[in-house]
Amino acid sequence: MVRYRIMFKRVAVGLAAAVVPGLVVAVPPVAYDGWTVNAGGVVDSSSSCTAVGVSCTTLVEDTGFLYEEVNTSEYSFLRLILTEPSASGDPSTLDFTNETFIPFAEIGGGILQGMAAKQVIRDQTTNFVATAEIQRSDLRVNALVAEDAFNIKLGQNMSDAEMLSDFSYRNYTQYPSWYVPGAATPDSNNVMGEVLDINQEILVGEAGDTTKKQLVDYRKRDGYQGFSPSAWWGLLEPITTAGTETLDGTEVLSWTEGQEVTSLWIVQSSNVGAVPGTEAADVSVAYQRLENLDDATVADELARDIPEPLKPFVWDNANFGVEPLFQ
């Protein structure tokens, strides 16, 4: 049975969908996944509605479904929570979840536009998890940290007895100049920055043999993300900062702020290809390639006859994040 509780309120709206100056709204307004669902399919979001200045009012509910108003000290939002009608537990254990926030009204007048949404699909038997997040318009612009001002954020990971696989991607689109006084960005939704990570480790020996393995790690960094917290209006924070790395002793790759740079590392364990019944074995092989796609320049290094390398030959943590390990 569906129960309805309709709430009416006066909303002050300006002539256009302009953001009230000085309004800062966290994205999302309350943390995702602050809810549970019981064996009867009733969704309970009370744990995310207890912070100071936060309150929630149910508008519509059904099995695996909750539509409510979330009020913060600055703004009111509509939140939609979806999961399977037969689901039971918290979001970290459920096979499907969807949570969406839409701005409703600012306390005292004004209006925001946009949305923030997160969807998760999970397969417990294969340890597979796929996550997608979308932020549009003001709910993206108002992110409190530059990295969180993404337009799209995707993640996927899977693990079983023979493979570990991780994928993540974020992109950032340009801000309209009418919204950001002085920002050197056109009135468009063109992508201005990207962050891509792919990491996969595979066992290539017989079943149960964990000594024969290969790893591929790929990273890409490009452009700019959100606003720097130290200079909120008009100053975009770079994804890539200027850097230089040297491979194979003499191959130097340099890049400047905002350029598109990639890192590829491939490594194979020392006993892949071992001859059965003998002590002969292939040696370790490691290859690293850095590339500046904007300047069409490359530096790379190939090594054989080496002990199994734990990590890449060179690494820039500031630009490429946590260094991958082969273990």
Image: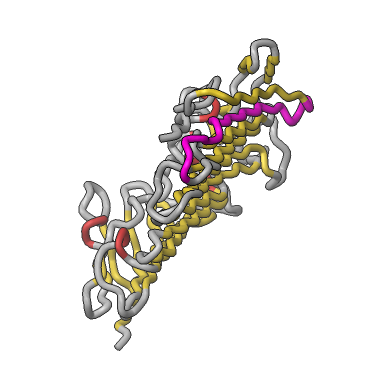
Answer with left or right where residue 27 lies relative to residue 219: left
Q: Is residue 125 visible?
A: yes
**Residue located 55% across and 43% down the image:** 198
Looking at this view, name the residue that lies furthest to the bottom: 1
Nearer to me, 113 or 101: 101
For the record, the magenta segment spans: 277-296
Quadrant occupied by the N terminus = bottom left
* Residue drawn where x is 32% and y is 85% of the image: 2
Find residue 223 and report its horizontal and vertical position in percent. 65, 32
Q: Is residue 68 above or below residue 201?
A: below
Classify 298 as above or below 26. above
Q: Position of residue 303 (x, y in %)?
A: 61, 24
Q: Is residue 185 left or right of residue 52?
A: right
Is residue 286 magenta-colored?
Answer: yes
Q: Is residue 93 above or below residue 320?
A: below
Front one among 61 and 289 = 289
Q: Residue at x 22, y 57 (%)?
A: 47
Q: Residue at x 40, y 68 (%)?
A: 96
